[in-house]
Each structure stands twice: as structure tokens, then as C-alpha cells.
Amino acid sequence: MEEKKYSAHDTAVIDPGCKIGEGTKIWHFTHIMSGCTIGVQFVIHVIRII
């Protein structure tokens, strides 16, 4: 299994097939939908659907 290089809160939902850049932080109650690409060192704040 590949080690993730981003951090995500326990309540964040990250669908399969996402590409998330190193150092990105995903806060609680966030849903990252399949096929998303998120850059390096982004911060995605509370209660977002992407």
C-alpha cells in the first residue's frame, strides 16, 4: 500500500481515484469526489465538496 503524503481528518471522505498532492491538508466534513486532482500543499477547509 502506498503511503499517503497528505493529511486528512478522520471525518473526511476521499473517494477512490483521487490524486492529492504532497503536503495537502483536508479538514473535517470534507468530501473529495472521485477523479479530483488537488495540487501540492493545498488546505481544504471545513465542510467542502470537491
Image: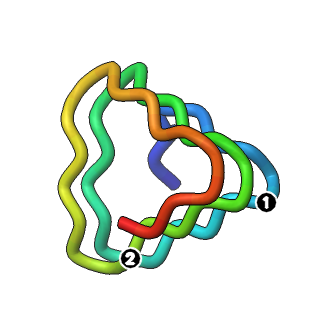
Quadrant of the rendered image containing residue 35: bottom left
Q: Which residue is mark 1?
A: 11
Residue at position x 71%, y 60% in the image: 29
Q: CA distance from mark 1 to mark 2?
A: 14 Å
Q: Is residue 49 above or below residue 12?
A: below
Residue 3: percent from the left, percent from the top? 51, 39
**Kind of residue at badge 1:** Thr
Q: Is residue 18 above or below residue 37?
A: below
- Pick the front one: 11 or 5: 11
State whether residue 29 is above or below residue 35.
Answer: above
Residue at (45, 69) in percent of width and height: 49
The answer to whether the residues at label 1 and label 2 have Cβ atoms under 8 Å apart is no
Q: Quadrant of residue 40?
A: top left
Which mark is on residue 33?
Answer: 2
Q: Residue at x 34, y 27 (%)?
A: 42
Query: Quick one: which residue is furthest to the right in this view?
Result: 10
Crowding near pointer 2: few (<14 within 10 Å), some, many (20+)? Answer: some
Identify which residue, 1 or 6, lies in the foreground. Answer: 6
Left or right, 42 with respect to 43, comes to left
Name the quarter where the C terminus is drawn: bottom left
Q: Does residue 14 appear to the left or right of 32 in the view shown?
A: right
- The residue closer to the viewer here, 21 or 30, is 30
Residue 44 image point, x, y percent = 46, 39
The amino acid beneath tag 2 is: Met
